Image (tube, helix red, strand yellow):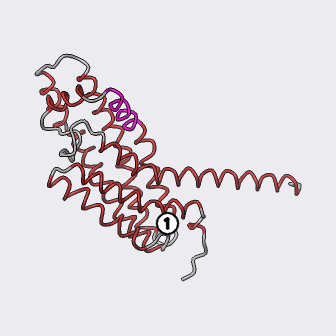
Amino acid sequence: MTSPQAATAELRSYEIYRRALRVFLALCILLAPLLLVFWFGLCPTGANDAACPDQGSSLSVVAAFRVMNSQLRQVFLLLTLVIPFVYPVSYIGLGALAVRRAPWLTALGVVCGFAAGVVWAAIAGQIALLDGMAQIAPNPVFVMIENHFYANWMVLTLGAFWVIGHLAGYVLLGFALWRARAIPLWAALIFILSAPLMGPIAYGTNQGFLQILGFALIFIASIPAALAMLHGRDEQPLVE
């Protein structure tokens, strides 16, 4: 039989672990869009490239990597490395706030967003390839390699998962958070309305600054979500 002292210590440890998990999820919720703001802001091919990097002109992309400030390039590469470890978890954190009141919307949103975040590891591989090419003398073979790489059905599929997944994830979780009343209405609307800004509008006009604006808005909407996670809003009683 467990002694009262042992039970108290076990409960205290559980509370510490739970608090640490809440802090971790809240940080991921905040950091995920903020990292993307800086990533698109540092994109070597500039603000007129919504896809970052532009996959249609490989030599110019390699040239952009080559002439980029070396310190900024290292920051860009570091962001590229960190994002796949943070971004998928941010959707889990958002989903935890809404799952009790909107389980189906939450499940679909988390699956879409998590899949998109995992795909970022493949994007990181593409960035590493371009950066490696930038370290050696220009060669027309780069164009052939890049064209074959981007035409591969696996790469195309992963790209589709990223574009569709992260946008659908924000829309679905925006509605789920709205339904759960976990965050203010204005924040839920930002999650929903930022998706077309970062998707059809940004890619349709090929304006990278719209990606920056979209993720900046997501960051703003993520602030009340992170606070709700820290305050245990997901554990409040289901009272209408």
Which residue is at the front of the view, 37 or 130?
37
Vertical side of 170 occupied by 80: above or below = above
Quarter of the picture containing the C terminus is bottom right
Quarter where residue 73 is shown: top left
SS class, disc 1: loop
Q: Which residue is drawn at 35% across and 44% down?
A: 38
Q: Which residue is drawn at 16% across and 19% down?
A: 138
Q: x, y percentage for residue 192? A: 33, 66
**Residue type at mark 1?**
Val
Magenta region, main secondary structure: helix
Give the magenta range. 70-81
Mark 1 closeness class: few <14, some 14–19, many ≥20 residues within 10 Å: many
Residue placed under numbered mark 1 in the picture: 99
Quarter where residue 221 is shown: bottom left
Vertical side of 77 occupied by 102: above or below = below
Q: Which residue is drawn at 15% across and 55% down?
A: 204
Question: What residue occupies the far top of the structure in this picture?
Answer: 137
Please indicate whether residue 138 sits to the left or right of residue 160 in the image: left
Q: Residue at x 54, y 62 (%)?
A: 227
Quarter where residue 125 is shown: top left
Indicate yes or no whether the magenta region holds residue 193. no
Which residue is at the front of the view, 22 or 44?
44
Q: x, y percentage for residue 103? A: 46, 68
